[in-house]
Image: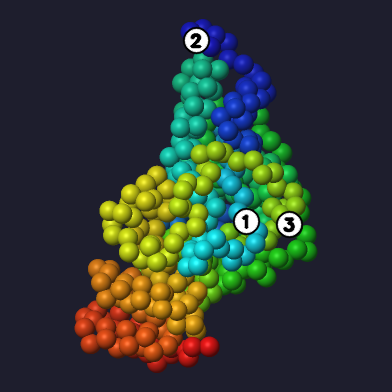
Amino acid sequence: MKGNAIPPNTIELTQAVKAAAYRLGFQLAGVTTPEPPPHFRVFEEWLEAGRHGEMAYLNSERPRQRRADPRLILPECQSILVLGMRYPKAKVTQNERSRPFTGKVAAYAWGQDYHDVLPERLKALVDFIQTQAGHPIPHHWYTDTGPLLERDLAQRAGLGWIGKNTCLIHPRLGSYFFLAEILFGIRLEPDAPFEPDRCGACSRCMEACPTGCILPDRTLDARRCISYLTIELRSAIPAELRSQMGDWIFGCDVCQQVCPWNIRFAAPSHEPAFSPAPGRPDPDLITTLTLDTGSFNQLYRGSPVRRAKRSGILRNAAVALGNQAAGNGNTVAVRALFQTLRDDPEPLVRQHAAWALGQAGGGEAATALEQRRNREADPDVLGEIEDALRQRPRIS
């Protein structure tokens, strides 16, 4: 509508906006108010307990205030449109590999980066609603990047419930979703909150979590979460958690893989932009350890994996290779790890390669560690070499 067109009434406008969202590829669309999120105090207590780890951006004062009141983001806000877009469902079978020495990447990172895909759709929705209303509307959108408690808003907008694994779960579509929000300075008809808790007595996600990071109060200790350890953590991975990380080098899907709502009920359809790109779902660990900055950036161009940076992915790949070679002294793995320990420019990567050599065990690994001990200058890497030499297992 243009010029002096009469804007549609609230119900008609809301229905039209949701229909437009579905046409743009969103499978879920709901509306809520800008009132404070119901679990903000839980979030505050989580921060106070330090369970956010090194994610200091979550704990700064201004974003904390905005999470408590969305109107501090957009003072004119009258409605929040919450949207969900599916990405591919991960395989349920654990430790499934097509070839030896492969790592795992979380399903959401198999295709294009959602930070590139979703904003275009959000802009199109804003353009649509402004055309329908016949005038500009104050707005602001986010997808995982803003100071909003997304899952709280999504539950209040009727999109599903927050499961024991902290994921938003829809009873027919499961939990493999990206969430996005548009704050609007116009009234839309709010949806009823999703009230039922359909996790019931099920505790599969808590039992399956390799590091035990899922807590009884529907929060998790990020400091133990594999997704945090492989993506957000920029420093050394705590030694006591490395062997529990398995093959994951970017993110983790375990708690979603075992969820009955994903196994038995979730629809398989997803946004094509997130379909697997060649080489990304199942990266070769030996090849990954040889990537320089240019080849890493080229391989993962347009992928969320770049968020972990080269040093983070090679650190993670060394841990995954150490876990796969643990106690067997595999010659291919040991030689790749020794080359990394000897040649990689990043002390963080060399440090984890030393740990992995200790895990592999055997005479060749011990010789590699002793050789490097005489030439390594970085104190953290030296400390890791000494620990690996003391703790290396015998070959089984």
The x, y position of residue 168, in whole percent, is 64, 50
Residue 140 seen in this snapshot: no
* Residue most extreme to the top: 4
| Residue shown at 53% from the left, 56% from the top | 106
Q: Which tag is nearer the camera, tag 2 or tag 1?
A: 1
State which tag comes first along the sequence, 3 or 1: 1
Q: Which residue is mark 1?
A: 91
- Check disc 3 and give the amino acid type: Pro
| Residue shown at 63% from the left, 22% from the top | 16
The x, y position of residue 348, in whole percent, is 32, 71
Q: Which residue is mark 2?
A: 2
Q: Secondary structure at mark 3?
A: helix
State which tag comes first along the sequence, 2 or 3: 2
Q: Which residue is mark 3?
A: 260
Q: Secondary structure at mark 2?
A: loop
The picture quadrant where one finds residue 352 is bottom left
Q: Which tag is nearer the camera, tag 2 or tag 3?
A: 3
User: Where 338 falls versus 51 (above or below)?
Assistant: below
The x, y position of residue 81, in whole percent, is 58, 35
The residues bearing labels 2 and 3 have C-alpha atoms spaced at a distance of: 49 Å
